Every structure is written in structure tokens, then in C-alpha cells.
Image (cartoon, rainbow, N blue to C red):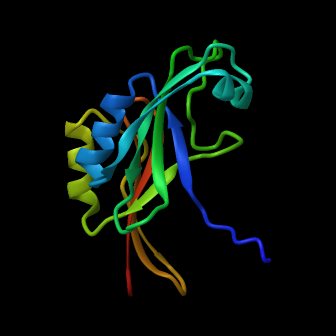
Amino acid sequence: MKNIIKYSHTNIIAKDWKKLAQFYIDVFECEPVYPERDLSGAWIDKLTKIPNVKIRGMHLKLPGYQDGPTLEIFEYNTLSKGENKPLIHHKGYGHIAFHVTNVDETLKKLLVKGGQKYGELIEKSIEDLGIIRVVYAKDPEGNIIEIQHWRSE
């Protein structure tokens, strides 16, 4: 039997999962996927290699999809001691991206809901692809988001 592979979710670790989930619901029209998660016990300790771990959070349905992938926002009862400030050019995952019809309107909503602008808002014609209007921003916990809109030339 052939092994079927399907992308499932992207996980963000939050200081306050409820507040961060609400940000993505308000700004990017993500929808909650119930039930909320409340994970603990020997099985999750073994999986994470963290003794007595407790994880709370939820999945959010991403706009434009019915059955996934989802954005999983989790909060651990203990965060690692190392400070991990997201930067656009650090090794590993850099950002998540949302295609929107109105970049300016989405950026305004993001700012009102506690996010920050990261770079400049740019409009650029890219040969063979079209015109992109794009800006990087941060959610209230500092995770980087790309807000983009492509159109034909």
C-alpha cells in the first residue's frame, strides 16, 4: 500500500494561547477547531521528553481551507529558559504567510489587535509572476507574518 502524505498543521508556542488564538481569529479570519486541547500524562511526557508537561491550546482552521491544514497554537506549563526572538533571517522557520485581497486593511486590523509592522510595505513587479503588494508584520508575541496580495500585470 502506498504511503499517502498530507500536510497537517503548523504549531506556534505561545505565552498566552487564548489571546494569540483570538488575534488570528480577529485578524486573519481563522476559525476554532474544537475541542480545545488539554494534554498531560505519561504519554505526552514521553513524546515531548518534558517531565510533567501540561499543554493547552487549540487548532485554528486557516482561511480558504475546509479540512486543514490548521494553525495549532499551544501553551506549555513551562517555557524553555532560552529567549527565542523571531527574526526574518534566523535559521529554521521564518514566517507564515496569508494572501489577502487588501494588504492595507489587513495591516491596519493587525495593528489595532496588538500586532506590529516589521518592515516596509512594498509593491513590486516580478517578471513572469505579476505584481506583489507585501509587508512583514509581527503578531502580539513576536511571530513573523507575511501579508501579501498578488495581481496580474
Residue 39, compared with residue 125, is above or below; it is above
The residue positioned 54% from the left and 42% from the top of the image is 11
Looking at the figure, which quarter contains the N terminus? Answer: bottom right
The residue positioned 50% from the left and 52% from the top of the image is 96
In the image, is 125 to the left or to the right of 11? left
Q: Nearer the viewer, residue 74 or 116?
A: 74
In the image, is 152 to the left or to the right of 3? left
Q: Nearer the viewer, residue 76 or 115?
A: 76
Quarter of image, res 115: top left
The residue positioned 28% from the left and 38% from the top of the image is 22
In the image, is 70 to the left or to the right of 121? right
Residue 38, compared with residue 139, is above or below; it is above
Report the residue that reaches farthest toward the right.
1
Residue 53, compared with residue 130, is above or below; it is above
Q: Nearer the viewer, residue 29 or 110?
A: 29
Q: Estimate the x, y position of residue 2 in percent, counting from the top left.
A: 78, 77
Looking at the figure, which quarter contains the C terminus? Answer: bottom left
Residue 93, compared with residue 50, is above or below; it is below
Quarter of image, res 113: top left
In the image, is 3 to the left or to the right of 38? right
Q: Estimate the x, y position of residue 107 in percent, counting from the top left.
A: 27, 50
Q: Estimate the x, y position of residue 34 in percent, counting from the top left.
A: 35, 45
Q: Estimate the x, y position of residue 50 in percent, counting from the top left.
A: 69, 19
Quarter of image, res 133: bottom left
Q: Across the whole image, how many numbered discs are drawn on residues?
A: 0
